[in-house]
Image (tube, rainbow, N blue to C red):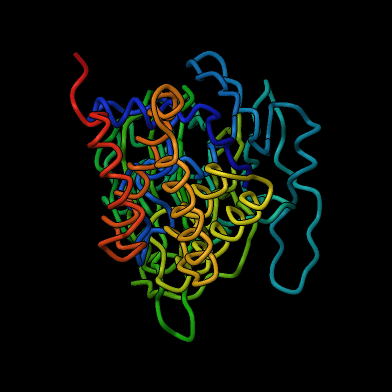
Amino acid sequence: MKLPPLPATLLPFALLATTALAAPSTGSPFYGDAPDATHPWAVHDQNRPQPKRVEPGTYSTVAQPGKPPSDAIVLFDGTTNTLDKWESDPKPGEAATPTKWIVKDGALECVPKSGYIRTKEQFADCQLHVEWAAPANVQGDSQGRGNSGIFLMGLAEVQVLDNYNNPTYADGFAGSVYGINPPFANALRAPGEFQVYDIVFRRPIVKDGKVIDPGHLTVLCNGVLLQDATPLEGPGGHMKRSIPVAFPEKGPLKLQDHGNPVRFRNIWYRPLPPRAVEGGTDGVLTAEATTAKRKAIAAELRADAAKRSGTAQMLRLAESLTYEKDSATATKVDSLAAAYVAGLKALTGVPLEAKKGEALSVQRAFAYLTKFEVVAAPYAPKTALDAVVKAQGWDLPKK
Ligand code: MG
């Protein structure tokens, strides 16, 4: 974690003190509600890491695939080179062989009866992008028309089927979580045209036979939402009610050979960050994970405080106490705070007036620390500082 510098002038605090509702543009400590039992960060916490930069890709058109975002892992880009990332999906105990599916006109085409294919790479939670086209030459009906499937971790199937003008059972429709949940809508283009699937997959997490998180599938087809974090009931399947089971840590992506020459293009994924239950640090964490994260943030702030002196050091140490109480740090803050107010009180006239902005920012920090019970009220340095501010008329509105 990289800590932002404390502003040398502490100007944002001064502005806040005089215009109570104005938010500083870059955030500041002692501002939003403090960390609590399940939130390691304050509201608007300026120590929270910035999101990583990703260069966006481009959207696909019916005629042409778009470009993946900069951090995507490309599984098929229309060339035979990326076919090397795939292999046959062998029966248990047998070795994988090169896939017999073919690359034609920039698309990966299923060769009927050649079998499923799978990625050599294994992964789990992801944002997955797949484009597919059912044969333009319409043959068969129901589950027999343009059938394939996208198997996340080789287990949970998002159905690929030509349902353009072709009813079938709802939980086997294009965009269904097969055997588990029908899609909200039928947003398919005509057979022969490419359909764009965007999928967000979270694998089930089962520990000691207990379902910690059932796992979820979110699916969009041509920009239309079909599944909204649909809970998985295990992998799903044909005819049988599936039950929640533990998924492995990772698995390959599989594409189904259901006897139809369905074509695929522009296949890529982005791994997702771990969920809170997996030790991730976003969202609402467990109390244990929150405590651990708050401790780590406090340690960084204290290390940063050691490089500073005077008021900046006092504020940084005080900030660390909002994440983790620590008696040695609290004692140091108390003595620095007492020394700060004593120093202020020793000044008069122009030198004292020059300290106005800083004093108001420190006052704000003290008010925050008592409000969130980081220090016990009444807090002697706060009482003394409030008296100075009042005597100087710094708390009065500007004329
Ligand atoms: Mg299928």
| Picture mark count | 0
Left or right: 93 with respect to 369? right
Viewer-closest of 157 and 359: 359
Instruction: Judge whether 25 appears above or below 312 on screen.
Output: above
Viewer-closest of 22 and 199: 22
Assign the C terminus to one quadrant of the image: top left
Viewer-closest of 43 and 150: 43
Instruction: Judge whether 312 appears above or below 81 on screen.
Output: below
Q: Is residue 275 visible?
A: no
Q: Is residue 57 visible?
A: yes
Pinpoint residue 358: horizontal percent, then vertical percent: 43, 33
Viewer-closest of 316 and 156: 316
Left or right: 324 with respect to 87? left
Left or right: 32 with respect to 307? left
Instruction: Judge whether 138 appears above or below 100 on screen.
Output: above
Residue positioned 19% across, 27% down in the render = 396
Residue 371 placement: quadrant: bottom left
Residue 24 placement: quadrant: top left
Left or right: 355 with respect to 378? right
Pinpoint residue 204: horizontal percent, then vertical percent: 46, 66
Pinpoint residue 74: horizontal percent, then vertical percent: 68, 36
Pinpoint residue 395: horizontal percent, then vertical percent: 22, 31
Single out the residue that lies furthest toward the bottom. 208
Residue positioned 57% across, 37% down in the render = 4
Residue positioned 52% across, 43% down in the render = 311
Instruction: Judge whether 26 appears above or below 101 on screen.
Output: above
Residue positioned 47% across, 65% down in the render = 330
